[in-house]
Image (cartoon, rainbow, N blue to C red):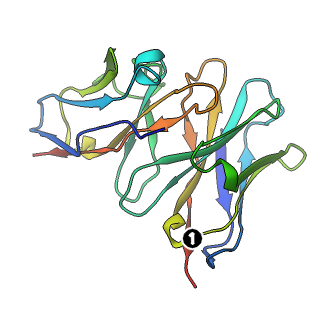
Amino acid sequence: QITLKESGPTLVKPTQTLTLTCSLSGFSLSTSGVGVGWIRQPPGKALEWLALIYWDDDRRYSPSQKSRLTITKDTSKNQVVLTMTTMDPVDTAAYYCAHSRYYDGGYSFDIWGQGTMVTVSS
Amino acid sequence: QSALTQPPSASGSPGQSVTISCTGTSSDVGGYNYVSWYQQHPGKVPKLMIYEVSKRPSGVPDRFSGSKSGNTASLTVSGLQAEDEADYYCSSYAGSNNPFVFGTGTKVTVL
């Protein structure tokens, strides 16, 4: 059974850097065709894709957030880490990580983590 | 890259059908057969309902169907049930440098 679980701070101050970890279970990011992405959702607003990393270390970023994001994977720990710099109150949102299948997933996210709420406030 | 455009709301009575549109451009929806749809109940995690325009993941009822014409994709929910009341988001591939663009979201109400 594939599961993902996000972890990280619930509160960060403006200008700080956010680091979120996605712990994977039931699959490995060293397996061909596997991808893990990050998506966020401000309260009452729409989903926004942020970043994606594939098994081969190919990384993709949202053009609008690219300058602030870094996504990495640690296959030994079966984790994916997202860092976002220069946090602002508008970045307050639920942050989700999700599983994607490169070969037959049609650029979709088929399994999502429970999400973690991050509030940006001084 | 702008978000895909969806109507803010849609509604229908139990047993009826409701169709939600998702309008993009030739650079996303119109250019690829990689449109997905997600269902999100209040306070819950999004759930994949449709991928590659019209394919249903295992376990998704066949009451949910997807289609595309030009730059607009659509999700139809037939035989509406109370549990279908939720927010729905579309998503499209928009090229290798922007593989995921989400829609603005549609709240479906079962009357």
Residue plotted at (54% across, 73% down): A119
Residue plotted at (51% across, 68% down): A92
Q: Quadrant of the N terminus of chain A?
A: top right
How many other residues sit within 10 Å of disc 1, few (<14), some (14-19) or many (≥20)? Answer: some
A102 left or right, relative to B17 = right
Q: Amino acid at mark 1?
A: Asp
Q: Is residue B50 visible?
A: no
Badge 1 marks a residue whose secondary structure is: loop
Q: Nearer the viewer, residue A86 or B8?
A: A86
Vertical arrangement, residue B14 with respect to residue A114, above or below: above
Disc count in the image? 1
Q: Nearer the viewer, residue B44 or B30?
A: B30
Q: Quadrant of the C terminus of chain A?
A: bottom right
According to the picture, the residue beneath numbered tag 1 turns out to be A88
Q: Position of residue B49 (x, y in %)?
A: 41, 31
Parent chain of label 1: A
